[in-house]
Image: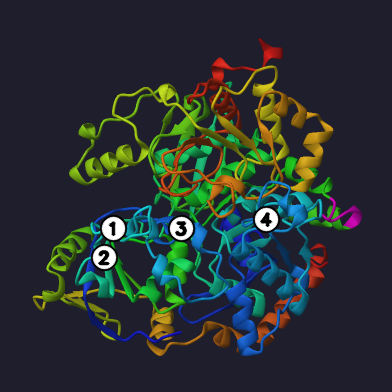
Amino acid sequence: MSGQKPRTLFDKIWDAHVVETLPDGTALLYIDLHLTHEVTTPQAYAGLRAAGRGVRRPDLTLAVVDHNIATDASRYTGIVDPESRLQVETLEKNVVEFGVPYIPLLSERQGIVHVIGPELGRSLPGMTIVCGDSHTATHGAMGALAFGIGTSEVEHVLATQTLLQKPAKNMRVWVEGTLPVGCSAKDITLAVIGKVGTAGGTGHVIEYAGDAIRALDMAGRMTLCNMAIEGGARAGMVAPDEKTFEYVANTPDGPKGAALEAAIAYWKTLPSDAGAHFDKEVRLRAEDIAPQVTWGTSPEDVLPISASVPDPADAPNETRRAQMQRMLDYMGIEAGQKLVDLKVDVVFIGSCTNSRIEDMRAAAAIAKGRQVAPGVRALVVPGSGLVKKQAEAEGLDVVLREAGFEWREPSCSMCLGMNPDKLTPGQRCASTSNRNFEGRQGPGGRTHLVSPAMAAAAALAGHLADVRDYQPKEMV
Amino acid sequence: MQAFTVLNGIAAPMPQANIDTDKIIPARFLKSIERSGFGKNLFANYRYMPDGSENPDFVLNQEPYRKAEVLIAFENFGCGSSREHAPWALLDFGIRCVIAPDFADIFHNNSFKNGVLPVKLPRAVCEQLMEDSRMGGNAKITVDLEREVVVRPNGEEIPFKIDPLRRHLMLNGLDDIGQTMQHVTAIDTYEAKQRAAQPWLNR
């Protein structure tokens, strides 16, 4: 390979998947893994049926239900909402008709699509992975190129196992140094979005690099990449390393033995070459990051927990001033209020951003031996049946229940207001999810994005709180 | 897909940045298994009051914007979720074109697949068009994909650029799966090669 131009991780995976380049530069890109769920597929299967087409590679396709699923016992007795039930039943019919592997609702492997892909060993380094869901960026943590697509593209992948794509630009986000106590991958990803803005990554794929990224465990890297889309990037990636290989080796369905050895030899060739070109580079010092919380209705409107609500009068221009005022009005907050003074009604710990076993542990460590504040509803929703099982084996469910948290069944839950877990108008929520858009968690709901430890601290305090004041009791 | 050639219609002003897909169509309306019928829930959280009645202050509830075919907005239109229900809802309402300084990537892709044309124009031009659109029915805007120009009500022509392949597919209302199917031999060859080189990918 000597003499070849240095390439990025993204360039290498891209080049390895180009089936053909069309005259205008559009690539026909091969897709190694197509994850699917009930919300963005019914119209795609209807399209296949209408055109008399089949699924080209059912073996590279995996279906699961997550968005519509209630987190109470109704999963065992039957979905109550008729529209949700129809959407799930439609998927169940489609996977039979087209021969697509499906993880049923009552399987312990069921869970949020972006939790189960890596957990089962289906999302692997070097792969191209797509799903009709913007948070597909999560799987980039494995050292894969993973991005969200629309339903027409879902149909295109089902029919052809390819996509028509223009190459993205390369962006690198460096985070060097040691992350302070009380901070996690969620605080890094929010701080990055705060720095680059919600459109800062548009047209780019972000590679996260630096020793603070290397120090993250795989769950942390998933949290980080999950929110690349909130920075406008199609995908986020972390180069595969020994942690990645060890993680894959411990998955139930990942390659084993000689196949794994051969795969690792290939995966070791993937990290960006020295001197590879990045179109955009951003640098942060991990030491400068404090526990983050969003105050507005866009993920870029984020501040350290010690800060106060910003004043629209300080905005650089009239457009921004009006936008900030609109956010303050929607959020029911006033300029100058301290963030830690904002009372919360609900706390949500879950979603494809933060529902892995490490997130459950982080929440339980803060909750242990303490009590949820009166009047606060606090939900903990594990991301999959396997996460739930592991957490229960560790006794985390008992710790959380004793502290007054609800321990629920795996689903997308209160991330998006599509299943029974919703905010009511005016309710304020400290949430470990990924979007604080107006109405995202239910019409009129007010979302503050935080890490699992920060969410647990808010539940105990009854208001947004600094997790550094709530360190695990064993450590005190 | 419905072809898009030339559109002359009423444009509705939505002078906001970051109009996300949860605003365009909230998740609770994504439960349909059809492609149509989303128009009534377009911008539902703003178009309707909590009791279900229309919010008279919302632009698409006002004449003549109930018949808007073009939307003028600011930066990062369509950010957030990958839901194709967003362009489906716009289309079902009757909006065939969105003009903004820039678009989020997935929404941008999804729009082209459905005959909804996203036109990128500089912020200053969008501000002019925003003013034009406030004149309502007296100020129709023309969007000509054939010639790649937006024509303001005063006759001024503003050029824009669309990727040639996407323009071709949209002008002719073509399904790109059919187009890709012509490359099936190349896909077969790729699969055979990959199967040999990376056996762990095959289950």
Q: What residue sits right under mark 4 in the picture?
A: A113
Residue A387 point in image, percent of width and height: 76, 42
Q: Residues within 10 Å of mark 1 (few under 14, many from 20)?
A: some
Magenta span: helix, strand or loop, mainly?
Answer: loop
- Above or below, comparing residue B80 to residue A166 in the picture: above
Same chain assignment for discs 3 and 1 = yes
Is residue A256 within the magenta segment? yes
Residue B61's tag is 2
Quarter of the rendering occupied by the N terminus of chain A? bottom right
Which of the two discs, 3 and 1, labels the residue nearer the N terminus?
Answer: 3
Q: Quadrant of residue B39?
A: bottom left
Q: Residue A129 in the image: x percent, y percent?
A: 65, 62
Report the mark closest to the observer, 2 or 3.
Answer: 2
- Depth check: A207 or B125 in front? B125
Residue B26 numbered tag: 3
Circle 2: element type:
helix
Label 3: how many Cα within 10 Å (few below 14, some 14–19, many 20+): many
The amino acid sitting under disc 1 is Asn
Q: CA distance from mark 2 to mark 1?
A: 7 Å
